[in-house]
Amino acid sequence: MNFHQLHIFYTVAERGSFSAAAQALHMTQPAVTMQIQSLEDYFGTKLLHRSTKKIELSEAGATLLPFAKRSMQLIREADEAMSAFTHMLEGRLHIGASLTIGEYIVPRMLGPFGQEYPHIRMAMNVMNTTQIMDDILKHQLNLGLIEAPVQHPDIVVESVMQDELKLIVPSGHVLAKAKKVVLEDVFKHPFVAREKGSGTRQVIEDGLENRGADASRLDIVMEMGSTGAVKSAVEAGLGITMLSPSSVKHEVALGLLKIVNISDITFKREFYAIHLKSALLPIPVVTFLSYLRRHDQGLDVFEDSQDKLVVMKEEEQLRNEGTD
């Protein structure tokens, strides 16, 4: 018996067929069958009951399954722990990220992560959750980062970061100067919203529902298909909105927008990592997941130094333009 055989057994059990397991493991079906037979010979008992329609675990197979799963977890943990001693962790990480995470969260992580793990190369595609799930199931992505939980029998979903939407107003707005803002104040002003079905819009509507408030009371004057468009509309004074503070760091630093706390309601959400349940995650993926867990609730760690540099450059550019 070896780890490779346990991995194959676990994948067959999770996928429910030799052909599906072979596809997931990039092996031929006869090779998968041979490894399962070798494992059964080693234990001297049947692990799987085979039929024309599906594969079922025998009593012995059901007993072995949690040990096989734990062995995979231990190998990942061992690889990650030993990488701290070699300092030569390398490989390629290909992830998919939904809009807010891909545009405003992950890019700010790349600098610190790259400094800590200089030999890991990362590629990221920004797409919607459905596309991310499809590409993960097709083995085209190692990992997905999404803004709402999903359910699929072949996909593992794990909360890795927390975020909270805040009220965003133009710097000269009356609410920007108020000492205390409550939800009722929000209903009194034009509101710029993300489109229906977006993660941000859903968090707002769910938060209002949980508070016992009617989302239709929002005076929505515009619906925008991107966070950037929402910010531009608010900057222009067309309304107020609710966004992640991570998405308005530059505008706040430049004095264009202001983040306002609402005292009687919160709009909290979680960001999720998703990956194939049966696949043995590459070490770069395990490392990045561990990195996300270590910095949970600490998104500002990735942002402050980069924001200061950007703001300094932009202020210098504005001064130069003023002297032309």
Image (cartoon, helix red, strand yellow):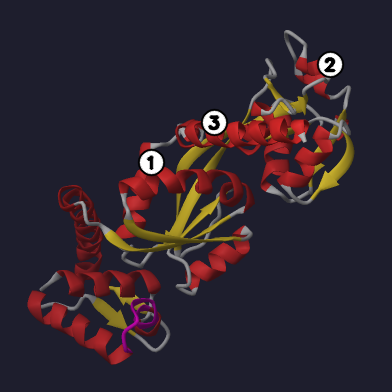
Q: Earlier in the sequence, mark 3 or mark 1?
A: 1
Label 1: which secondary element: helix
Q: Earlier in the sequence, mark 2 or mark 1?
A: 2
Amino acid type of the residue tagged 1 in the rendering: Arg
Label 2: which secondary element: helix
Label 3: which secondary element: helix
Whether residue 187 appears in magenta in the rendering, the answer is no
- Number of numbered labels in the structure image: 3
Amino acid type of the residue tagged 2 in the rendering: Val
* 135, 260: nearer the viewer: 260
Mark nearest the camera among 3 and 1 is 3
Could you tell me which residue is drawn at 35 percent across and 46 percent down? Answer: 115
Mark nearest the camera among 2 and 1 is 2
CA gap between label 3 and label 2 equals 27 Å
Residue 22 in view of the camera:
yes
* 6, 108: nearer the viewer: 108
Q: Which residue is label 3 attached to? A: 308
Q: Which residue is label 2 attached to? A: 174
Q: Which residue is label 1 attached to? A: 293
